[in-house]
Image: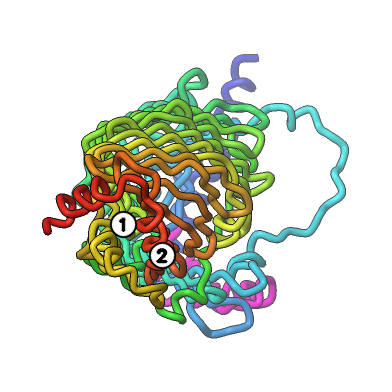
């Protein structure tokens, strides 16, 4: 009995040896390069794209199943324009674990990758056809299908890569060059390090930036997180990112940035801010362009976290010590609470973004803020100086920035001290009032002129982009100024009447009408009404004495 068993084992050994020998002979003699033409032909038939295999194909069968390729190009569909190319690529899968349903991959290496991504006018991309697949009728579920395939990748190495993106509708072009990516192991319960570096370039508006990221990550089911430090130009970033596995992924973050100028990266930075004291009306071609506002990206976003920034500039606004909490779900995002230091004062409030209605709502309180530099940086207006408090409660909706301005609604309150209204000199107008020369034609506001005040307060009700005021109260040692009227925010225009009077009497008033674009405002004074007030005054000499002291005569 023992002899037949020995013979059986011997026979099996011979068969195994012959099998291994056959595999080795096949691996050593098989030349995949003979099938290049067939591979290129099949690619053209199935995708309508031209595949060129210029380099040598290398296959390995044992102990790993692997492939290496170089000099590969793939065209766009139905065209000879290059879509993607690479100088070399290599990857291998361990053979024995593969038989057990485990895909254990050595480090995947890509070198010299070049990709040209294009968004067409119909919102499709030049790779959309590659993502399309024919729907197949599902067959009966087999028992072995219930066992999931386990993937385990030792790492990913990408070097000397470049990706270019072009939007044919807008003409926007963005490119990443000198792209390098190195990761550690990618698998369930794995931890590793990640390194990313690239140079970013944009044409409209022109932008060049350097990106560098170093960090660690954890792919544990209860963590799914990345701890990292990164550098974007002169900005240093430290943070944590996490994702919770669910039907709809949920993201979490905790970011700290030492300083960042977002205007460098936003399209709005294309608008040049005029120099202090100079008002430059927008050019016609610039005014014709209306920046789109699209909040639809919030739909499907489920995230929460916190952000801290040491110094931030955005839309001209300069902030420091910014702290904000963010929560996004159901197409809405709440940035609340948030706080910051700005222009010698403090800011606190809440901001709401609604991607379902493309709507923005905010409630902000500015405390002890220097209003002059704030308005110059954000609104490019140099009409007011002073320090104090501003309270805003506003909402707007629309598909463009101008539509948002025209829909603006809410309230605003201002209370300032020790400041000045620029563009008009009330004292100078009173000096001219002595002549009572009658109504004069409109005069352009002069930024060199101003009216000083010790206190200023006003409240506004805002509807359809128009801010209406009835309770302007401006005080100075010798003057009292009231007023009422409208400021059209959507059209950047004003239609307002102020009335100035001398302290101690209400008989002498100077009515001044302010009208026109905010950038080219004009005022008109009713001197005849002033002369009438002087003639009717019962205090006569007392009023004239006050005027004499005020006017320095």
Which residue occupies the extreme left position in the image? 552
Q: Residue 330 appears at what percent x and percent y?
A: 66, 34
Q: Residue at x 68, y 44 (%)?
A: 356
| Quadrant of the drawing holding the N terminus | top right
Residue 371's place in the image compared with 277, above or below, is above
Whether residue 51 is visible: no
Residue at mark 2 to residue at mark 1: CA–CA distance: 9 Å
* Viewer-nearest residue: 10 or 17: 17
Q: Which residues are magenta?
A: 30-59
Q: Looking at the image, is mark 2 or mark 1 earlier in the sequence?
A: 1
Give the image quarter of residue 267. bottom left
* Relative side of 305 to 178, left or right: right
* Viewer-nearest residue: 175 or 108: 175
Magenta highlight on residue 33: yes
Q: Residue 335 appears at what percent x and percent y?
A: 48, 32
Whether residue 493 is visible: yes
Secondary structure at badge 1 equals loop
Picture disc at residue 312: none
Q: Residue at x 36, y 52 (%)?
A: 508
Q: Residue at x 37, y 63 (%)?
A: 531
Q: Are marks 2 and 1 in contact (CB under 8 Å)?
A: yes
Secondary structure at badge 2 equals helix
| Quadrant of the drawing holding the C terminus | bottom left
Which residue occupies the extreme top position in the image? 1
Picture disc at residue 518: 2
Q: Residue 282 appears at what percent x and percent y?
A: 40, 74
Magenta highlight on residue 112: no
Picture disc at residue 383: 1
Q: Residue at x 51, y 46 (%)?
A: 469
* Viewer-nearest residue: 532 or 326: 532
Residue 82's place in the image compared with 90, above or below, is below
């Amino acid at each position: 009995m023992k002899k037949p068993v020995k013979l059986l084992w011997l026979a099996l050994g011979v068969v195994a040896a012959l099998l291994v020998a056959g595999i080795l002979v096949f691996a050593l003699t098989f030349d995949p390069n003979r099938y290049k033409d067939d591979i290129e032909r099949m690619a053209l038939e199935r995708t309508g794209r031209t595949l060129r295999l210029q380099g040598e194909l290398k296959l390995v069968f044992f102990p790993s199943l692997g492939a290496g390729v170089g000099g590969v190009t793939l065209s766009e569909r139905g065209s000879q324009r290059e879509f993607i190319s690479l100088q070399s690529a290599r990857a291998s899968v361990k053979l024995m674990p593969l038989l057990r349903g485990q895909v254990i991959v050595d480090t995947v290496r890509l070198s010299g990758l070049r990709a040209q991504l294009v968004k067409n006018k119909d919102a499709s991309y030049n790779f959309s056809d590659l993502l399309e697949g024919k729907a197949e009728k599902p067959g009966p579920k087999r028992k072995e299908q219930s066992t999931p395939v386990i993937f385990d990748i030792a790492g990913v190495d990408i070097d000397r890569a470049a990706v270019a993106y072009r939007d044919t509708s807008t003409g926007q072009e963005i490119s990443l060059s000198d792209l390098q990516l190195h990761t550690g192991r990618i698998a369930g319960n794995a931890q590793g390090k990640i390194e990313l570096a690239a140079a970013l370039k944009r044409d409209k508006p022109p932008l060049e930036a350097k990106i560098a990221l170093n960090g660690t990550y954890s792919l544990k089911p209860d963590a799914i997180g990345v701890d990292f430090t990164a550098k974007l130009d002169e900005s240093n970033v430290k943070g944590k990112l996490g994702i919770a596995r669910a039907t709809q992924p949920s993201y979490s973050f905790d970011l700290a940035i030492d300083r960042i100028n977002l205007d460098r990266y936003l399209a709005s930075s294309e608008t040049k801010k005029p120099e202090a004291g100079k008002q430059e009306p927008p050019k016609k071609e610039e005014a014709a362009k209306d920046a789109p506002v699209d909040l639809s990206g919030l739909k499907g976003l489920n995230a929460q976290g916190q952000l801290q920034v040491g110094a931030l500039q955005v839309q001209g606004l300069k902030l420091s010590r910014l702290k904000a909490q963010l929560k996004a779900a159901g197409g809405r995002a709440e940035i609340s609470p948030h706080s910051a230091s700005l222009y010698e004062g403090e800011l606190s409030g809440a901001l709401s973004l609604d991607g379902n209605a493309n709507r923005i709502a905010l409630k902000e309180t500015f405390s002890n803020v220097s209003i002059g530099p704030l308005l110059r940086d954000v609104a490019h207006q140099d009409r007011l100086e002073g320090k104090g408090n501003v309270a805003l409660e506003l909402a707007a909706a629309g598909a463009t920035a101008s539509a948002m301005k025209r829909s603006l609604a809410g309230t605003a309150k201002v209370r300032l001290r020790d400041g000045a209204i620029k563009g008009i000199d009330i004292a100078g107008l009173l000096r001219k009032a002595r002549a009572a020369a009658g109504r004069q034609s409109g005069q352009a506001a002069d930024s060199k002129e101003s009216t000083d005040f010790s206190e200023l307060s006003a409240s506004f009700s805002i509807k359809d982009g128009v801010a209406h005021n009835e309770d302007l109260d401006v005080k100075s040692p010798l003057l009292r100024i009231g007023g009422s009227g409208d400021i059209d925010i959507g059209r950047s225009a004003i239609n307002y009447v102020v009335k100035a009077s001398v302290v101690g009497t209400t008989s002498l008033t100077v009515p001044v009408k302010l009208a026109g674009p905010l950038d080219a405002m004009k005022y008109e004074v009713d001197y005849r009404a002033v002369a009438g007030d002087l003639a009717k005054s019962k205090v006569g000499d007392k009023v004239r004495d006050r005027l004499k002291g005020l006017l320095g005569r």
